[in-house]
Each structure stands twice: as structure tokens, then as C-alpha cells.
Amino acid sequence: MKNIKLNRAILLFEILVFFAVNAFSAVEKPGPNVIIILTDDQGYADVGFNGCTDIPTPNIDRIANNGVKFTNGYVTYAVCGPSRAGLITGRYQDRFGGS
């Protein structure tokens, strides 16, 4: 009888330890914040962080200076509508009639 109570106590302790370890290890790290700015007819030097002095862009400059800049971006169509639809849907425009 003592052996059964001891086994139950050990099993209960193991279950409690298992759940405690899983509860503390389940803390998730926050994912990265991603901002995509899609603009029409914007040249490379049309924003301040790329050297533009004509038009002030302080907020975009702050985002670019505090984050990661992707300097080689290419569109998937010559005009803005299909490119925007492709970005939003994650599909090629020609596959769903967006061109």
C-alpha cells in the first residue's frame, strides 16, 4: 500500500513539473514588425534617406534609419494596379486576371 501511494506521489510530482516547465517555456518572443510602403512613380532619390533635399520626409527617414532598408525592389508589372493587387494577394497578376 505504501508503494502505491509513493508511486502516485511521484507521478503527481512529475506531472506538476512537466506542466510547470511547459508553462515557463511557452513564453513567445514577439515577431518582427514589417512595414511595406508601396508608392507610384517614386525614384530612388525621392526620399530623404536616399539623398533628396527638395521634399522633406522625416517620418520615412526615421523608419529607414531605425530599421532595415531593402534597396533593390522590383515591381511585377509596369503600372501600379496589377503590382498592388499582386502584393496584396501574394499571387501573380496574370493568374487571376489582374493585368
Image (tube, rainbow, N blue to C red):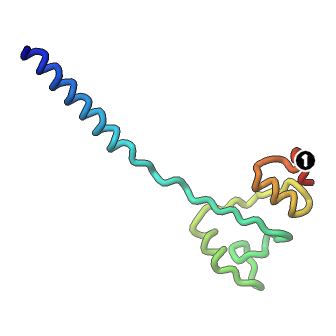
Q: x, y percentage for residue 92?
A: 84, 47
Please say if 57 is above or below 76: below
Please say if 19 is above or below 45: above
- Figure quadrant of the N terminus: top left
- Figure quadrant of the C terminus: bottom right
Residue type at numbered disc 1:
Asp
On screen, residue 77 versus residue 36, left or right, reads: right
Label 1 neighbour load within 10 Å: few <14, some 14-19, many 20+: few
Q: x, y percentage for residue 63?
A: 61, 70
**Residue marked by disc 1:** 94
Foreground pick, 19 / 38: 19
Residue at 32% x, 44% y: name it: 24
Residue at 55% x, 56% y: name it: 32
Foreground pick, 50 / 3: 3
On screen, residue 8 versus residue 67, left or right, reads: left
Q: x, y percentage for residue 25?
A: 36, 42
Residue at 15% x, 26% y: name it: 9
Residue at 75% x, 79% y: name it: 52
Disc 1, SS = helix
In the picture, residue 64 is in which quadrant? bottom right
